[in-house]
Image (cartoon, grey):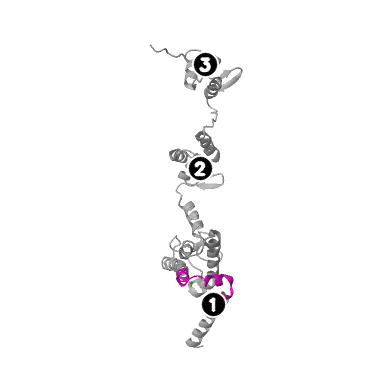
Amino acid sequence: MSQLTKTKIRSMLQYLHILECIMTKLYKRYIEFSKEARQRLDQSFYNRYYKMIRYDKIYSTTGKFSSTSLPVYEKWKSYEFFKKENFEIFLEKLFEELDKQGKEIDEVLIAKNIPLLVRINLEEGFYPGNTEWITKSKAKKTNRIHRIKHPIEFQGKVYSARALAKEIGCGIVTIYNLIHQGKTSESEIMAVKLRSNNIYIPNRNAKTYEYKGEFKTAQDLENISRRWGANISRTLIIERIERYGYTPEEAVHKPTRTRKKK
């Protein structure tokens, strides 16, 4: 078979593929875009392909698997074959995102929502079944999780130190202290959240005092004092009991002396 015949067959196949695309609803919506918008879409799709091939070239040269050196499915190295298998999915994701926006479609809106090609399993290269087209908003969320220096899982979500501090209402230094101390379990984070919201958590190791037949901590006694209107601080309650020999009942209910002004 001569080279001219092969070229004719290839051209015919490409023409048939174009006719097949025209019959789809996606392509009908695609040709409704302005010429500039279609050119931008085609260029963006090619850029995704070019970036993927660049990874493969580095992999072929070095033979090492890394974030910038990735193998590519052999047939996808041909742009025509890659476009035939992926362009329709590319358009589907684009229209899906545009429909969510509910706005009038223009070039700016199209440019902001052009899908990206990503790998599902980061331990493998670009192969059918291991790639998907996702929107930029989803990609940013995924990348943000991968970029977190100290990811912390709390209530089924992954947070950075700053995001977790905002979520539970405490300072970021408190979260870094938890990380350095290795106290990032859900129960320990919840305890910090409760303290940040002024919800008292009794300390199991705290010293207790017998008050009306029950054992109470100094914090419990302070709360009782507040309810009775005496407003005695726990520091003063401890000092009264341990230094001056007050009973817990006297330490809680006896009001402090107010000095008369001369």
Residue 156 percent coordinates (x, y): 56, 46
Q: Residues within 10 Å of mark 1 (few under 14, many from 20)?
A: few
Q: Amino acid at mark 3?
A: Ala
Number of the label disc, if any, that sits on residue 18: 1
Residue at the outermost right position: 213
Is most of the magenta stretch helix, strand or loop? helix
The residue range painted magenta reads 22-42
Q: Reply yes or no: does residue 37 show up in magenta.
A: yes
Q: Amino acid at mark 1?
A: Ile
Marks 2 and 3, Cα distance to the nearest angstrom?
39 Å
Residue at the outermost top position: 262
Question: Callout 1: helix, strand or loop?
Answer: helix
Q: Reply yes or no: does residue 94 show up in magenta.
A: no
- For disc 2, the marked residue is 167
Residue at the outermost left position: 262
Residue 242 percent coordinates (x, y): 49, 16
Q: Earlier in the sequence, mark 1 or mark 2?
A: 1
Q: Is residue 78 visible?
A: no
Is mark 2 in CB contact (under 8 Å) with mark 3? no
- For disc 3, the marked residue is 251
Tell me which residue sits at (53%, 67%) in the image.
91
